[in-house]
Amino acid sequence: MAEARSTIQRMQKALIEMNIQLSTVLSDLSGVSGMAILRAILEGERDPQQLAALADPGVKATPEDIAKSWPGNWRAELLFVLRQPVELYGVYQKKIAAWDLPLRQHLESLGAS
C-alpha cells in the first residue's frame, strides 16, 4: 500500500528532524519494536534506556545501541509532526485488520466449491 509506505517515510523524516536515528538500529520502523518506541515517545517517555527496553528481544541491535540512537529534540511542533503519521499508520492497520477475516473467509469459500 503506497499510502502506508509514504506514512512510514513521514515518520522517518520526523524522527530525523528530532535527531532520533532509530532507523539506523531498527530495520523496520513500522514493526512491533519501532511502533512501541514511537508510541512511548508520543506518550511522553524520554529516557533512552526505557525506550530501548521496549524493543523486542529478537531485534539484532542491543538495547545499548538503541539507546545511543538518539539524544532527541522533543520540541512540541516536532512531536506533533511525528504524531500525525503514527496515528495515520494505526488507522491503516485497523482497516487492514477489518478486511482480513472477511477476505480470508471469502477465499476459503472459493476453495471449498
Image: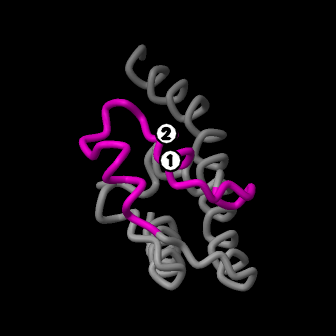
Q: Nearer the viewer, residue 78 or 74?
A: 74
| Residue 17 position in % (x across, y down) | 51, 85
| In the displayed structure image, the side of residue 33 where residue 86 appears, left or right | right
Instruction: Rate crowding at label 2 as few (under 14), some (14 to 19) or many (20 or more) other CA atoms within 10 Å.
Output: some
Q: Which residue is located at x 65 percent, y 49 percent?
A: 95
Q: Quadrant of residue 23?
A: bottom left
| In the displayed structure image, the side of residue 64 where residue 40 appears, left or right | right
Q: Nearer the viewer, residue 109 or 91?
A: 91
Q: Main secondary structure of the magenta part?
A: loop
Looking at the rendering, the stretch of residues picked out in magenta corresponds to 41-70
Q: Which residue is located at x 45 percent, y 29 percent?
A: 107
Q: Nearer the viewer, residue 48 or 8?
A: 48
The vertical placement of 53 against 25, above or below, is above
Q: Which residue is located at x 43 percent, y 25 percent?
A: 110
Q: Nearer the viewer, residue 100 or 70?
A: 70
Contact (Cβ within 8 Å) of mark 2 with mark 1? yes
Q: Which residue is located at x 37 percent, y 60 percent?
A: 68
Task: Residue type at mark 1: give it.
Answer: Gln
The vertical placement of 49 against 113, above or below, is below
Q: Is residue 17 magenta?
A: no
| Residue 45 position in % (x across, y down) | 67, 54
Residue that extends furthest to the left in the rendered view of this protein: 60
| Residue 39 position in % (x across, y down) | 64, 53
Give SS at disc 1.
helix
What residue does disc 1 label? Answer: 49
* Quarter that holds the C terminus: top left
Task: Residue type at mark 2: give it.
Answer: Ala
Q: Quadrant of residue 75?
A: bottom right
Q: Is residue 65 magenta?
A: yes
Numbered circle sitting on residue 32? none
What residue does disc 2 label? Answer: 53
Give SS at disc 2.
loop
